[in-house]
Image (cartoon, grey):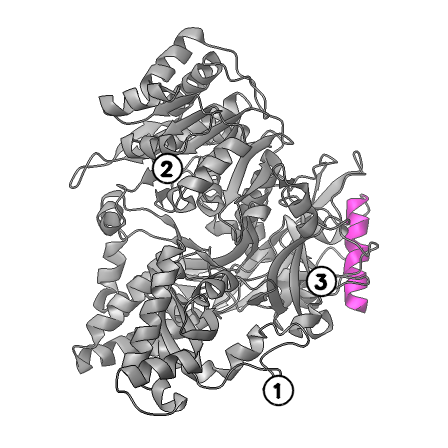
Amino acid sequence: MKSRKRFVRRHRSAMEGKPASNPARSTSESDELIDFFTAGDHPTSSAVVEDDARSTSSPLYLNIVEDHRREVGRAASLMCEPLIAAAPLGGAEAAVVLLTSKVIERFALGIPLYNNEKRTPSFTCANVCVLQGTDLIKVSKFYKDSKEGKFVSFLYEDTRTLYDGFRKGAKVSNNGPCLGWRDGPNKPYQWLHYNETLLRAKNFGSGLVSLGLMPGSHALVGLYSQNCPEWILTEQACYTYSLAVVPLYDTLGPDACAFIINQAEINLVVCENDKKCNLLLDKAPRCLRKLVVIKETRQATIQRAKNRGVELLKFEDVERLGAQKNHPEVPPKMTDLCTICYTSGTTGNPKGVMLTHQNVMAGISAVLTQLGEYKPSYKDTMISFLPLAHMLERCCENGMYMVGASVGFYSGDIKRLPEDMKALRPTVMPAVPRLLNRMYDKVQSELQSSCLKRLVFSLGMRAKEAELKKGIIRNNSVWDKLIFGKIKKSTGGRLRLMVVGSAPLAGNVLTFTRCALGCLVVEGYGQTECAAPITLTVQGDHVPEHVGPPVPCCCIKLVDVPEMDYFAKKDQGEVCVKGTNVFVGYFKDPERTIEVIDEFGWHHTGDVGMWLPNGTLKIIDRRKHTFKLSQGEYIVPEKIESIYLRSQYVHQVFVHGESLKSCVVGIVIPDVDVVKCWAVENGIPGTLSVLCANPQVKQLIMDDMLSWGKEAGLKSFEQVKDIYLHPDPFSVQNGLLTTPTLKMKRPQLKEYFKPQIDDLYRHLD
């Protein structure tokens, strides 16, 4: 502690212009510097973290630390020489100074390059600060002012909105390639460059204004399309005139789409094709007046729309109209609404998450800050295939545009994604667990045909894992050429960064992906309500099955969930988030907003987390009885159970799913009287225990449950894929029901039937 105080005094003197007492720093003093940056118990004068909305003039200072390393063999010794640079910043939206890649590298886990190997050091809790106070609040150490209650809002003074970000990218890239697509299989990618993209976006936005939309974030534009250049043109067109985008997507279903259009009072939707036009026309609310269609439509669709009082317009015609009218641009402010992103949610109608330009820009800036030297640049190319209607892909793409990088869109068929990647040869790729699970399963399936293949693969994995533990990230080893070359080739061969999100990723799959691709793979945790990122794993941390420390735009605390036996004093509880990325509220839904944002501004995520010893977060449960499958779909088990209970054969049912699995299974207690009666009629003898083990009985009950589920409109992923029949009912006596309400104790049921659940999934796999 004394050494840390000496270091602080010395640097305070430097900031005030006083000379240091000992300019020639010794090795021990370098150790003091390292000790200061790696300690996790920095004091703070504030017990509650809040955005900096007070100081508008006091300068902030950035300590830029330049490292000098001397390598002896494969070991490196670290010597530091601090340089002080003053950087006055703004107030209400405290900006982060763009840290140089070397500062990020040294300050937050980077190591030198040698022999084409990138090394990153072992991960420690140095990446998390703990704020003192009544609550245990953790913040990122990648932005030094986080511990003072200030969070990243933007990286550059002149780039505070997504409108600014795109123009920043155009300048940085020197009008480089921006949006790429290809017209069919075996065709090369074609590119729109930044300046042309900006011109077309302005023309389309001017066309929207000409059609009657008033500039300002109160005007909402619907967008119903797969990923394509026109999606981004529409988005940037809206930002050019301070309009807000409301994405629609297929998995919402026609009823939910109609609800959204009606609630948001959307009178114009940009639609991809004829099919999507007809889906909207099926249940079109009266407020819908115009559909702007990207692709060709049939004459029958045009007439059908006209009969319903809806005008169909071509995308290029609106562009042409806008170019003629040439309305002056109306750029947005950072506090303006940029999107209302509806989540399919859990029960009832979808909720419209209102996000401002600041919210989204804060999330993007925080991730770029934490990535440090690995962050994208104008030299990078990203493959776009995850739905742009979701905030993960949206943030990734807008981050790419801000640095002047290129984004190539997949052909629209996920089965052809490998072909698209081979043609595009991306360097950056966002991904979801379902995709990586498929890749892992395919490799494992191919290995079953040969013992020799399994042996060589095992040796390669062992060697690559050993390198990961040393912080080495590379794809040019003998094992890469011998074993993993085919996998690398399937992604285009240039991948250097992968960001994984939307659902938890199994540890063995994550390690396999890191070994096979030889690139940096970071896993994040987030929510739409937080403009996507909340936490992100750090380069150099090879340990899987956690989601990293908080990103620099927010802080996290855990709160007690007594009904589920999770307590903050045990480092477990509901994850609560506060920062510049937290949403404004749910659109026209103050009641549900109050449910998730408390009076102190903390967003209660509903996820239950646990702090690990190294300061990272692990998601372990869900407060409300909902969970997300590996493909990112939410499941509400109580809803499914209530439907299955309509079956005459079912007395009790427990529906279970896991975030690492793509389907749900069920534990069923049969109705003893009905099942026995059916058994007698069909000449099947035995007690209920015997009947529960009978395949015919199981098939009878499952078929009836699925029939009820189909009738009630359950989606395919909501239907159980297998069941286990159990003769003994859930009861208060066996600890599986609450008293006096007789509700199921889900954690206890999960533990009680763990062997049967594991067996069901084993057979499904």
Q: Nearer the viewer, mark 2 or mark 3?
A: 2
Upstream in the sequence, badge 2 or badge 3?
Answer: 3
Q: Nearer the viewer, mark 1 or mark 2?
A: 1
**Residues at marks 2 and 3, CA–CA distance in whole angstroms:** 39 Å
Q: Position of residue 376 (x, y in %)?
A: 44, 45
Quarter the C terminus occupies: bottom left
Highlighted magenta segment, given as a residue range: 1-16
**Foreground: 151 or 575?**
575
Can you identify the residue that label 3 sits on?
A: 36
Upstream in the sequence, badge 1 or badge 3?
Answer: 3
**Foreground: 310 or 157?**
310
Q: Position of residue 537 (x, y in %)?
A: 52, 60
Rendered position, 328 above or below 500: above
Can you identify the residue that label 1 sits on?
A: 733
Horizontally, residue 487 falls left or right of residue 659, namely left
At numbered mark 3, what does the secondary structure look like: helix, strand or loop? helix
Rendered position, 649 above or below 95: below
- The amino acid beneath tag 1 is Gln
Whether residue 302 is in magenta: the answer is no
At numbered mark 1, what does the secondary structure look like: helix, strand or loop? loop
- The amino acid beneath tag 3 is Phe
